[in-house]
Structures are given as structure tokens and as C-alpha cells.
Image (cartoon, rainbow, N blue to C red):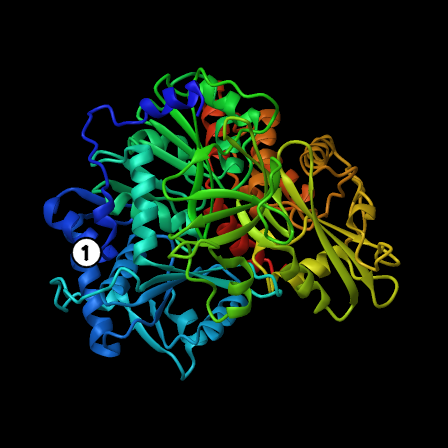
Amino acid sequence: MTASDTAARSKCFHPNGRFLEFSREETDQSIPERFEKIAQKYPDRLAVKTKNHSLTYNDLNSAANRMAHTILSQRGRKNEPVALLMEHDAPVIAAILGALKAGKFYVPLDPSLPHLRVKYILEDLQASYIVTNNKNLPLAKSLAGTVLDLVNIDELDSLPDGNPCIGIQPESLSWVIYTSGSTGKPKGVIQNHLNVLHFMMNYTNALHICLDDRLTLLYSFSVNGGAHDIFAALLNGAALFPLDLKEDGFTHLGDWLIEERITIYHSVPTVFRQFVEVLTSQSEFPDIRIIRLGGEPVYKRELDFFKKLFSKDCILVNRLGSSETGSLRMYFVNKETQISGNLVPVGYAVMDNEILLVDDAGKQIAGDEGEIAVKTRYVSPGYWGRPDLTDAVFLPSPTGGEERIYRTGDLGRMLPDGCLLHLGRKDFFVKIRGYRIDIDEIEAALRGCPSIKEAVVVARNNNSGDERLVAYLVPTVQPGPKVDELRRFLNEKLPDYMIPHDFVTLEAIPLTDTRKVDRKALPDPGTSRPELTPPYVAPRTPIEKELAKIWAEVLSTDEVGIHDDFFDLGGHSLSATRIISRVIATFKLQLSVRALFDSPTVAAMSVVISSKEGQKADEKDLKRLLSEVKSLSKETDEELLAEQVKSKKI
């Protein structure tokens, strides 16, 4: 460990000094046991706050208990799955705890995901019980049919709210979270109470999480990062602040962080970049003491923003982990930290995790570069209903005992001092805007299109730290399908973040001498306008010409027709913030990001701008607006975009 990393860790504590170490003995229990002790000790402290709810620990515990008693009365104590179909708000936190208190394991279902994907998860899980609320009850009924039982969390007020106090073993399952699967289908990663508490011990003690901390929940509750944020707060008596943009569009992230006095910020690097690009002064957020980034590589660019814009006492933490293992490595950065090269390391060892570098056969190598594997007792029991896949990546330790070796599929390089660099995925897993994606799943969906004979998908870096998915297609007939037709087809089967940015039509997929796909020979997608159903119509007015120029630069496209849909050109919610920022700065107008969703063509946006010509914003308003449109969270952005796409039937 370097002197800089040691110095950063030494500053990683809350200013009031009230940190209490999470002891190893406290991992030998269940999640509800730990939570109930916290709720009993701090009943009146704030537990969860959203726009719609503010719950103390007593409130949250009572709501969770009502949920638990309902489940127990209907399902008994068997350790079985409970599917949670709810939006990103405080009630789903109560439902998670309620399911765990009833001795079940929960399976989060994001209502914004395509219907077929949610249905597949329920069928793969063989679930028989769905917890939902009034808002999502129609969707739940359509999924449940006559097979699954439903419970509405909004109708539980009259039930008992005392702790159910059932015995839950630490090795009992706690959740199954579905990620992209290597067979073209999502796969469920299993976790148990012991592992989760061990993850929380390492997380708590590394960041010195304490009672007075206030943590963001920008990740969806249905992904691993969201689950970790929930329990990092609630198993330490801290306050959790979920941010949901689905109800009222985009929120003022910067203002919200200040108003809520957030102390620990956690997001993917993509969101952090969007957030900080418009900040101009130092120490904008004096309460933030930890910026934790993960899910994607962190580059020197993010490090420079951190050093320039945040307080001298703030610490940036870069993390490597997975749904199967929790945190494996952490790298602590302060204002004095220097790195060589463009890639920020993922750092040094986390307790009880031994990092190995292995070759293709899974044997440990003597060199400094290879596939990252971890040897630990605290690893996922495996994949739900997939013993073949479990056996392939979870290996017994050659020395015996309770430890196992998990092959991550990530490539790494070990520096001489033991610091690890994360070099990317070995297989076809990639991270796109913070989401872990298996390219095979996208390829399988594309091959299901009647007009597509062959499909290959790769991720390409656009030299700014952003990865883009590119699909290479061989159509069954010529001419092949238009890009907007392909997007419409895929939107029925995949989440938006899995839709390729570019589609390239080929006569044949290039192959190697061994008849495998030669991915290195796939051509660069270029910057030509994609083939769309609407014909190209050139900009006519000065406003249209300026808008087309902005869109072309942001979307890396040579030309944009006035009737080309923003989403058909490869746009998504994060690129929407860039476009609206440019539009606000160019035309000096008050515009929300939603304006682009409502008017997604140059022609339509030109009408909006023309109608606002008499509403010029002053410099102060412009600065505020530019800050607001960049202040977006990753998962909720994607959820809102999915809703917009669905409403537009694209």
C-alpha cells in the first residue's frame, strides 16, 4: 500500500468521530437481526427519505414487520423467493426487509424493464408470490395470471407490526439478483445473509460509516450496487436517500445533495462525469466526505474533477467488485494522490479476499497479468437453477476448507506494490453506462429477428471513456431492416441500456482461420447517418441548422435530418443532457431535459425554441439550468428513457 493510499484511508472517518467498528462477530447472524438491533437502539433516527416518504427506524421496522406477518400467514416459514415489483421508493425498502424478516429471499423486479424480461425472470425463478403496490398492481396481475399469489403493500396498515422473531440461519438465502446471462438469458446471482453481512463489515469499516452518515441510493434497488447501498445505511443506523426521477422527470441533483446534506455519494463514473462537468467552484458540497465510484473503469479525467471541485477532506474511493463476491479491491484517493497513466487503479486487498491471477485453464500464473480470480469463503452460493454455470466459475480451493475460488472473467495487472489495475472483461461481458451486460444476450435477441441471419455485437470505446455497443448484422434479404425498425424490435425484449448505439450491415461476418468470429476484423461503424425509415431532410432555418450541428456533434454523426428521431440516432438519457446543455447555452433559453423527450426531432425542437424566443434567461438562471440538466442518476435515467421509448412505441 502506498503512502498516499494510507494517508487517504487515515482521513476516511466522519468528522464527529462517532464511528463504531462493525465486528466480525456481528456477521454471524441474519440481516433482520442486525437491523432490528439498530431499530431498537435508534427508533427515532431518520432511516429513509424520499420525495414521498420520510421514515424513522421505528416506522421502517413497523412497516417491514407488517409485510413479514402477511407473508408468514400466507406462505409459512419456508426459505423461498418473494418477487418485489415496485418502483424506486421507500416502500420497496420496507418490502425487502419484510421478505427477509419472514425468512424468505427477495428477488427485485424493475417495473420499467420489458414485460418479456420480467416474465422470464419469474418463470426461471418459479416464483409463486409477488409483492407489489397500487401503482404496479395492474402490471403484477398481468404477470401473475392465475398462477402467482399477489400481496399489495399499500393494504397492510391494520396488521401486527411487532418483530416476527423467527430463527434465520446466516447461511439462508437473502436475495437473487438477475444480471445478463451467458446463454442469452438473464441469470440469477444468489446471496446469503452471512455474505451480505461480511460485505457490509468490509464496506463499513473501510469507509467508517456511522450514525450521522447520509447515503445516496442512485443505483436501482434491483441491481447489486443498490442492494449494497441499502444495507450499508440501514445496518449502521445511517440515513438512506433514494433518488427517483420517474414521477416528476429530472431532479436537481446538486441542490438535492446540498439540501439533504449527503455525506456519501455513490454512482457509476459515467454519472459522476455528467454531474461534475458543469461545476465551476471548489467545495460546492462541504458535507460530502466520500465519493465512491464503481461499475466502470475510472480514468484520470474523473480524478482531476474530484481534485478540482470537492473539499480538501473529501476522499474518492475506486472499487472493484461483483455481484458474486462483493468488494474485492479498493483504492483511496485524496488531493495529494498521483497516478501514472490514464487508468485509476482499483487498489489493494479487502479483508478475507485473496486475489489470484490465473490463465485460461484456471491455474495461477507467475506473471503480473491474467484473469482475476478471488479465493474466499464469502462468495455467492452460485447461480439460480444453473449448476453447470456455477461449477464452471466457482471452483473448490486446492487446499480444501470452506474457501472457494471464483473466476471473475475480468483481466487484471498486478503492480509491484500489490496494487491492482482492472483491464476489462475477458469474455463478452462489458459495462455500458454502469450496467453489466452479456453481449450474448443481445446477439440472441437480434438473431430472433426474422430479417436477421447473423449478428455479432461488440463494445467500442469512443476515446472519451464511454463504451458504445455496435451490432454487426447479416440480413436475410436485401435491403436489410432500417435502424428504427431494429430498435422497435429490441425494445420489446431488452432494457434500453442493452440496445446497441450503432447498427452495421455486412454481407458476411468475418471469420478467423479456425472459423471463429474475427472480432478484430469488424469494421469501424463510422459516423454516417444511420439508415432510417424517414428520408433525410436537410435543415432549412438558422435554428434548425444550429440544432442539427449540436445533435451531430453530441451523437458523433456526420449529419442529422430535421425529422430524425433522437433515439433512433443512438441517443439516450445521458446524451440528452449534453444536447440540452448545448441548446440552453446557445439559445439562452430555459429548457428542461424533458423537452427533448417530448420533441425528439430537430424540427420539433425548433418549434419549441421559436416559441420561447421572448423568454431569454439571465446568466444566473443559465448557470443553474446547466447544472440541473447534468445532475442525473444512472439507473433512474435509464428507467425514464425506457418509459419514454415505450410511450413513443419505438
Lateral position of residue 153 relative to residue 537, left or right? left
Q: How many marks?
A: 1
Q: Quadrant of residue 173?
A: bottom left
Q: Residue at x 64, y 41 (%)?
A: 467
Q: Nearer the viewer, residue 406 or 78?
A: 406
User: In the rendering, at what x and y percent does residue 132 appear?
Assistant: 34, 66
Q: Nearer the viewer, residue 94 or 321?
A: 321
105 relative to 617, above or below? below
User: In the rendering, at what x and y percent does residue 304 appear?
Assistant: 52, 21
Q: Nearer the viewer, residue 82 or 371?
A: 371
Q: Residue at x 49, y 20 (%)?
A: 618
> Which image quarter is the N terminus in?
top left
Q: Label 1 sits on what residue type? A: Glu
User: In the rendering, at what x and y percent does residue 7 appear?
Assistant: 37, 19
Kind of element beneath mark 1: helix
> Which image quarter is the C terminus in?
bottom right
Q: Quadrant of residue 72?
A: bottom left
Q: Nearer the viewer, residue 214 or 257?
A: 214
User: In the rendering, at what x and y percent does residue 390 appear?
Assistant: 51, 64
Residue ID for mark 1 = 33
Give the residue at the far front of this rendering. Answer: 399
Lateral position of residue 13 relative to residue 372, left or right? left
> Can residue 434 be seen here?
yes
> Can residue 135 be seen here?
no
521 relative to 140, above or below? above
Instruction: Specify few, some or many for label 1: CA neighbours under 10 Å numbering under 14, 14-19, or 20 or more.
Output: some
Lateral position of residue 179 relative to residue 401, left or right? right
Q: Quadrant of residue 77?
A: bottom left
